[in-house]
Amino acid sequence: MLFCCSTALAEAPIVSSHSVSPEFPPATTYGSTMYRNDDPRTHYEPRRFMPIDVSAPAEVLLQQLWLTENKVGAYASELVPELRELGAALFADGQYPDAIDTYRRAIHLLRVNEGLNTEDQTGMVEQLIEAYYEIGDFISADDQQQYLFRVRKQHLDPSDPEMLAAVEQLADWHRTAYLSQLDRFRYPRIVDLIDLYADMADAVEDDEGELSRNRLPYLEGKLRTEYLLSVYPGESEEPLQVEAEQRNNADLPDLKKLRFVGFRSDNYRHGLGTIREMRKILESDPNTPAREIAEVMVRQGDWYQWHRRYAQAIRLYRSAWEAMSGQPDADNWRQAHFSNPLELPSEVVFQPGRMPLRLYHGAEVRARFAVTRHGEAHDIEILSPDRADDQPAVTRGYKYLRDMRFRPRLEEGAVVTAAPIERTYSIRY
């Protein structure tokens, strides 16, 4: 899991000509980060679409397609299944440009014969996205990702598990595109993510009411986006070069820029408000298990901790501990959450996806340190690499650890300084 370091709200402003919101100092650039590979809470795998089954080699399928086309014509719907399977065979053979052309033709015929937003095309759009990934055309993959979501949204209820999966698919794409600096300007991805989750939570509320549990996954996604927003580093002059021409958002409407500035200035309040909405939903249901109440208290404590509100964080951690009193799994739950210091945030937020990152240097750093009651690394000792071998990695590993936020250790419900621990991190700078 990848962790960025949050900025204290009382910091003096730093004006940057590259930032959409220059009145806020950047906490860190995305490249200046560290992450723990063995984090026990996170098992993130980049999202991939399952391939379409192939019944014959591409040469055989191409001959069959030719015979069918001569019989029914070039625009008949009967060609779609054969084109779909031929595209899959070409993809399996690594012939990605040909697979793209084949899928695009099949999708075009399906739209001509059945309408623009038919569900039957979704499997092929998924494979088209995979093919664009393979050739490194992430701009075209971006277009298809967003088109795929529009089709699914038209056919699925907001509370449908398939709709939630579609939202998470698009959200993960926006998140990794943001981290990889796909666009010339990065901030619109944050606005799109906030809108995506907020719109879906509102749609559920319209159908089922404010206290519907089906709102919870979308509120959790919005909270993850608030963590991402909290360390917005400003805009880079040099976007990631994934192809000859990059998408240019220089002419984006001023409204989106203004909305982003508003989101950025209210980040702490909005994140806290989202968690409070989650708590209200859970606490309004008398059948909510104590474990779920404790979990949302921990989330709120983590948000306070991330923003260095130590007293509020400690109070929530204690409340979560007490909420599990008398529960049959209390000991295991408390051990999992509080027996050792845990890096924040606990959600998958900064984990890179399948696109290449802007990366100048990377290193693996092993360190020994204690974690204070306030969740800060103390008495840091870099065990490896040796300073003589990699001075920059040692210096940055030390610096990043000083800024990292931890959930502190609790003993018998009391927050304590943890004994020295050893952990290995990968750093990027």
Image (cartoon, rainbow, N blue to C red):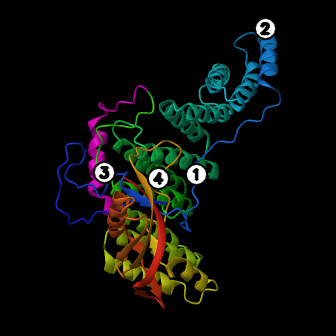
Magenta-tinted stretch? 244-270
Q: Earlier in the sequence, mark 2 or mark 3?
A: 2
Q: CA distance from mark 2 to mark 4?
A: 51 Å
Q: Earlier in the sequence, mark 4 or mark 3?
A: 4
- Give neighbour class at mark 3: few <14, some 14-19, many 20+ (Cα, 10 Å): many
User: In this rendering, which labeled residue sits more in front, label 1 or label 3?
Assistant: 3
- Residue sitting nearer the eye, 320 or 2: 2
Q: Secondary structure at mark 3?
A: loop
Q: Earlier in the sequence, mark 1 or mark 3?
A: 1
Q: Write the residue at 64% across / 31% down.
A: 118
Residue designated by label 2: 70
Q: Earlier in the sequence, mark 2 or mark 1?
A: 2
> Which mark is on residue 233?
3
- Give neighbour class at mark 2: few <14, some 14-19, many 20+ (Cα, 10 Å): few
User: In this rendering, which labeled residue sits more in front, label 4 or label 1?
Assistant: 1
Q: Write the residue at 39% across / 79% down.
A: 371
- Residue sitting nearer the eye, 53 or 394: 394
Q: Write the residue at 46% across / 53% down.
A: 202
- Which amino acid does the dot numbered 3 rest on? Pro
Residue designated by label 4: 202
- Give neighbour class at mark 4: few <14, some 14-19, many 20+ (Cα, 10 Å): some
User: In this rendering, which labeled residue sits more in front, label 4 or label 3?
Assistant: 3
- Which amino acid does the dot numbered 4 rest on? Asp
Q: CA distance from mark 4 to mark 3?
A: 29 Å
Q: CA distance from mark 2 to mark 1?
A: 43 Å
Task: Give yes or no for residue 364 being in the magenta stretch.
Answer: no
Q: Secondary structure at mark 2?
A: helix
Q: CA distance from mark 2 to mark 3?
A: 58 Å
Q: CA distance from mark 1 to mark 3?
A: 29 Å
- Which amino acid does the dot numbered 2 rest on? Asn
Residue designated by label 1: 164
